[in-house]
Amino acid sequence: MNQNRVNELFGAAQALREKGIPLYMQVKKAILASISAGRVLGGDTLPPERDLAKYLDVSRVTVRRAIDELVKEDVLTQRQGAGTFVSERVEQPLNHLRSFTEVMEARGKTITSKWLDRSLGMPHEDECKALKLSAEQEVVRFYRLRYADGKPMALELATIPSRYILNPFAMEGSLYDLLEQQGCRPVRAFQRLRAISIDEQRAHLLDIPALSAVLYIERTAVTQDGTPIEFTRSWFPGDSYDFVAEIHNTV
């Protein structure tokens, strides 16, 4: 990265001489300011540590500490052998029932999927409970790795009673589009969210380190008459999403 580009991204080096503030915090502040100003965008590569250290007239240890802090806060992402990148975060409202495809397409991203399982079978205990099924009622399962602009963004395992979709190979794109075509698109859902450490197999699929913190979501969606139709479990990389909700005062 040439000197002009570093100047463009990070402004005047003398700005990092604020009294009483540790240098690594000033480097961190400069990086955050560049991201906030849109000079560095999600997915952009940060200049090498040695270039930043030289330009900002600080040690590489100082730059590395600032970057390590931002990696811990999921502002930056480091990839072995590729460098340090600005994390690409997707803001996803929790008060709107939308499919992954709808959320990503609204942001102009190209959606692709890798199928891990499409099958017809008997329900597991948690699926029976969520979908209010007996152990003898068949379900279809759709398990896939979802990409946006070529980046792994989510693992989704959806279970649907087979009376709505008998052939698991009938779905290629959006599950909600297929359900809508059959007149049974869900209209509301209950979601449970929690942070977990991801196992090695799923971490490999998402291209993140094993035991990384991810957001795990269980969603049970119902039709207009309140019938459960979808039970989906999703794993989202922690550095890729901001889930937001509007909260009202009920007093």
Image (tube, helix red, strand yellow):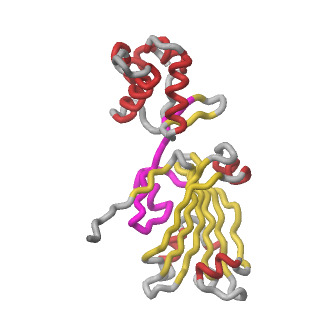
Q: Position of residue 235 (x, y in %)?
A: 59, 57
Does any portion of residue 113 appear in the rendered image? no
Is residue 197 rendered to the left or right of residue 228?
right
Is 126 a magenta residue?
no
- Residue occupying image coordinates x 50% and y 69%: 191
Q: Residue 120 sits in which quadrant?
A: bottom right
- Residue occupying image coordinates x 66% and y 72%: 141
Q: Depth check: give the residue in front, 85 or 5.
A: 85
Is residue 245 rendered to the left or right of residue 172?
left
Determine whether 243 is above or below 80 in the image. Answer: below
Q: Quadrant of the C terminus?
A: bottom left
Q: Depth check: give the residue in front, 54 or 103.
A: 54
Does any portion of residue 1 appear in the rendered image? yes
Q: Which residues are magenta?
A: 84-111
- Residue occupying image coordinates x 51% and y 41%: 74
Total label count?
0
Is residue 26 rendered to the left or right of residue 196?
left
- Residue occupying image coordinates x 36% and y 30%: 33
Q: Position of residue 27 (x, y in %)?
A: 43, 23
Q: Position of residue 140 (x, y in %)?
A: 66, 76
Q: Depth check: give the residue in front, 175 or 191.
A: 191
Q: Position of residue 134 (x, y in %)?
A: 67, 88
Q: Depth check: give the residue in front, 212 or 202.
A: 212
Determine whether 238 is above or below 140 in the image. Answer: above
